[in-house]
Image (cartoon, rainbow, N blue to C red):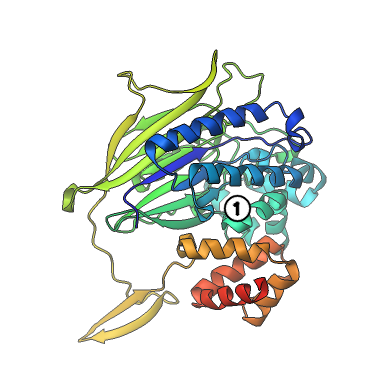
Amino acid sequence: MIASMLILHISDIHFKSPQCLDPQQDPDFPIRTRMMRDLMRQVELLGDVGAILIGGDVAFKGARDEYETAWKWILQLAQISGCPMERIFVVPGNHDVDRAIVRQNIPTQSAQHMIASAPKHQREWRLSQQLAHEDSGQSLLEPHAEYNVFAAPLGCNIWPEKPFWHQDVDLNGGVTLRIFGLTSTLLSGKDGEDDVSGSLYLSPRQTVLDPVPNTANLVLVHHPLDWLSDGEDVDDVLTNRAAFHLFGHKHKQRAVLADTYVRIGAGAVNPSRGEQPYQPGYNLIDLEVAGEGTARHIRVELHQRRLQDAPEIFVAITNNQGQPVFRTNIPIPVEADLPVIGVPNAISEVAVVGEIIEAAAVPDAEAAMGEADTRDLLYRFWRLTSGQRRTIAQDLGLLEEGEMLLPEPERYGRALIRAGERKQINDVAAAVAKLEN
């Protein structure tokens, strides 16, 4: 447990090769240096960062060398901010979609067009149909291939059966922060072209956001609502089911502090140098559970930092009162947990008490991947060779028929969640340790 959690929220880093491969020829390199130095000073004042949330556009064209360079910088960012490696989370942005694949892959184009052209009332069904189809589902996700290689050690990779992720992080006071990483880029890069506002689709499939007692839902997604064809529907869901809404893409830092939620826009770490105004930025969000009983709440302090050009330093964005901190309190609803009764395939224990059947729900194996030890295991598992990963998954019976044909991030992502469901995480850890030695 921790007394409070300081979250670093960044987006739109845009590592662009070949420039980013040589720091001496990367025009964005000095801006990232300025940001890191400012972050070091903020950490001295506020304490270590407890989690890094990256809102997409890590790369510029979804190329592997861009992600390799980005990963080195992200590890440096974690080190200087005091953030554990197992507390880094990411979602894809439109620049994490390889549009060259979309241009060259007719099945990808067909799948995107089938969804985008469907009438509004059929779009959810059409998306589910395309994702469920063995070939169409893989084609729809293929432009995210390099993003998935990058995101797999973070437990943030996606695949047709699971186009978004969710993981739990403990706050103090018995409250859980459940982070949902939603994918707004399934239709991104259609025909290999730039996206236009209102052309993307999230779908109710990604916004279930079940209200769990003592749990505050945080949604991390790249595109703001006006970029989504179902933006109004998503808005309704978020305002009712999520306490924190974190967006990127627009390169503008915004903050909406409502009675029951906080909505934050990230500035770009590296916006286009042609943008006016040119204002790289980042956010720090401090969360602390306070109060008792029905008065319990999450204290929120938002620090938004942006670059000014003369002198070239990061400064605080101030609120309407001229203060460098935006403050609010978000209530934590006191709700009774519901018994799970007679739900097929969703119970682990059933006990008969008189004439009442009480059923305990199977733990959420994916959400539990947010535990520090498990996320550390993810890093170690993905540092192994492909052959070693295959040996572990096969020896522990974690692969099902046909899954060896899947891309590795999906293949072993499925296997690791399955290990959690079968309570085999310790077996995976032991196998990884054996191969490491």
Residue at the location (70% across, 63% down)? Answer: 408
Residue topped by disc 1? 127
Q: Which residue in the rendered view is the most extreme toward the right?
A: 104
Q: Quadrant of the C terminus?
A: bottom right
Give whichever of 1, 209 is nearer the camera: 1
The reply to whether residue 265 is in sight is no
Occupied quadrant, residue 160:
bottom right
Q: Nearer the viewer, residue 212 or 154?
A: 154
Is 430 drawn above or below residue 153 in the view shown? below
Indicate whether 271 appears above or below 388: above
* Residue at 35% from the left image edge and 22% from the top image edge: 319
Quadrant of residue 323 within the rendered picture:
top left
Q: Is residue 278 above or below residue 299?
A: above
Is residue 377 shown left or right of residue 110?
A: left
Q: The disc labelled 1 sits on which kind of residue?
A: Leu
For the point 23% across and 62% down, the residue is: 336
The picture places residue 50, in percent across and down from the top left corner, at 44, 48
